[in-house]
Each structure stands twice: as C-alpha cells, then as structure tokens.
Amino acid sequence: MTTRAYLDWNATAPVRPEARAAVADALALTGNPSSVHGAGRAARALIEDAREAVAHMVGAGANQIVFTSGGSEANALALSGGMRVLASSIEHDSVLAHAGSDRIAVTSDGVVDLDDLDAKLASGRRPALVSVMMANNETGTIQPIADVVRIARTHGALVHTDAAQAAGRMAVDFLGLGADLLSISAHKLGGPQGIGALVVGERASVMPWIKGGGQERGRRAGTENVAGIAGFGAAAIAAPATDWTSVQSLRDDLEQRAVGLGAEIFADQAPRLPNTASLRLPGMGAETLVIALDLAGIAVSAGAACSSGKVRPSPVLTAMGKPAGIASEAIRVSLGWTTTAEEIDLFIAALGEIRGRIGRRDLDRAAA
C-alpha cells in the first residue's frame, strides 16, 4: 500500500530506467570525446547520438544543439549577447536575472499580453531579444509562442523560449515555431540532473561564458559531460511515449476534489500542461501547507521558493494580479508518468485533514 506520494515533478522528475542505464553504460567507458583515438571516438559517438535524439524531440537540427549544465545555464547563454532583453513577468529567475526592469505583462490567467509586448517593442530603439517561456513552471500555463514570434518579427526582434517544463510534456517544434533560441533541461523529463541544452537557430548567435576550448562548436568550452549527455539522449527518446492523457485525468480529478475541500485553483481557464496544478487552501500559508503535507508523506512545492528554502509570495501570481496574501498561499502540485490514483487519494485525504484543522483553529479563535 502506498504511504507516500511524490507530487513535485516540475521540480525534478524521477530518472527514467532508460536514462539510468545509459548513464551507467557511459560511465563504463574511458575516453575524452575530443581525443582522436578509438576510446575518444566511442565517447564522441555517445554525445552525437544523444544530440540527434534531443534535437528530434524538440524539432531542431542536431547542429543547433549546445549542451550545457542545465536549463539555467542555457538561459544565461541565450541572453548573453548584449541585446536589450525583454522578458515576461512570469519567467524563471534565471531569465529575469538577465532581463531589464521593463517586463511584459500577463493576463489574470497568466498568459502573456501580446498587445503589451507589441507596445514595448515599438517603444525601444535597441535591437531586442524577447524571452517568453513555453509553459510556466508554477501554473503550467502554455504561452502563445507562435504569436510572440510573429509580433517580434515585425519589430526585428529575436525570440528565446524557456521550454524546460514543456519538453517531453507537449509537442515542441523549434523550426515550426520560428523561435531563435530554446532552452531545455534533462531532469525535468526523466534524465539526470546537471545537464541541459540550448537550441540556437540560424538568426541567433551566442557569446560563450566558458571559454578556452573548441567544444560545442566553440559555444561552450570544457570537456563534455558524456554520461549526463547520454542519459539526456535516452530520456529524450523515451519521453514522447508518455501517456499524458491519463496524467491529465488524474490532475483534473485532484483539482475537482480539492475544490470540494475549499481550495482555489489558479489559471484553470487557460491552456495548461497536463500535469500541473497551482492551488491554495485559503487561510493556510504555502510554507505551512508544504510542511504539513510533507509530514503526511506528500511532496509538493510552494508557489515559489528561492535557493535558501525561504518561501515568498509567488511572483507569478503577483504578476497575474493576485494580492500578496493570496500569492503567499499558493502551492504547486505536479504529476508524472508514474503517478497513481492512490497517490491522488493520499493527497486529498491529507488536504482534507489539514483543512479540518484550519476550521477547528478558526472556531477556537472565534470562541476566544
């Protein structure tokens, strides 16, 4: 009988068996992929096979893939060209750290405001790089990237999209979208942690942060992480076979039952990833709720947390117009390909028990 539930897949997904095996096989090899002898060529072959697999997953050419240490480095590399960076107000911190203070607004459902994007591009004189994520890490809201690209092109701007949460969970077609740069991360789709990639289109150029070698066509120096890349490639092959329809059914059941307990669901009227729910239990701070659920054996995340582990009001919900009090109560529940109905039952039972304690506390306060 299941006694614990891992419902924090947007933070990191369990490593797929195929990826684990690929990493182990790669670690059994000895050889620098830049060496010309047989051992080096064997390591190089693993990298190039993985490059092909990752490229196929996102609809790109293999020569457009630059392997990095993860999604955050991919974002930093994408935004390092010295252009004016115009980012949406709901981007990951690794994007916002490289963007100016003028942000693209979003609607109350967390969808980027295309009119605001158009106006902000029209008001600037410097060449611009627009950064809008493909799907939000907190709410799961899917962004209209094709429309973002269309508007950007009318102003001569380039487009970067952070697809860390989208890749492996929805169709991603880099060439079809017409974007210029796209970031992905292996551990979000069942690969190992510490490996990601930036897809670089024909119109874009990047300024390498790590210099001193010719690896990755001069765009990222340093001996490649052969084992991590091999695991990434294996995960990229396995990911498209995931049945996200059944995952969405579990997510929808969770939301419906949570609403019955008094929860509020955010962005539920917008197109969303099939596995993500952002919700709050009124009167319960996010940090308190995350801890209470953890004590009940259920792993979820607060709406937003910095690296120190301190919870702050979700900047995503704040950008959506939610008051700080409400934004500070948001938690993220995210599912994956091994999530079961029994885990959803555990979550709902725990949420109901916590809700009961809140009700009793409120009654005690009223009586006092």
Image: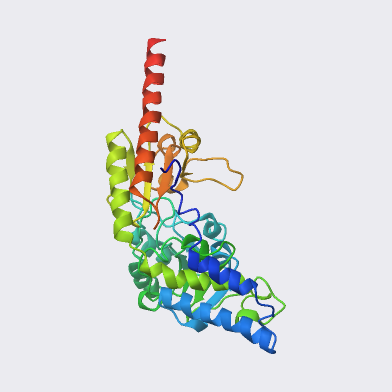
The foreground one among 326 and 45 is: 45
Q: Quadrant of the C terminus?
A: top left
**Count of numbered circles in the view:** 0
Q: In the image as oriented, which residue stretches furthest toward the front?
A: 1
From this view, report whether residue 359 is shown above or below residue 165: above
Q: In the image as oriented, which residue stretches furthest toward the right?
A: 212
Left or right: 32 as drawn, with respect to 354? right
Q: Quadrant of the N terminus?
A: top left
Q: Position of residue 55 (x, y in %)?
A: 46, 77
Residue at 40% across, 24% down: 357
Left or right: 332 as drawn, with respect to 291? left
Q: Position of residue 266 (x, y in %)?
A: 34, 45
The foreground one among 43 and 82 is: 43
Residue 81 visible, this orientation = no
Residue 295 visible, this orientation = yes
Quarter where residue 273 is shown: bottom left
The foreground one among 176 and 297 is: 297
From this view, report whether residue 204 is shown above or below residue 193: below
Residue at 40% across, 77% down: 59
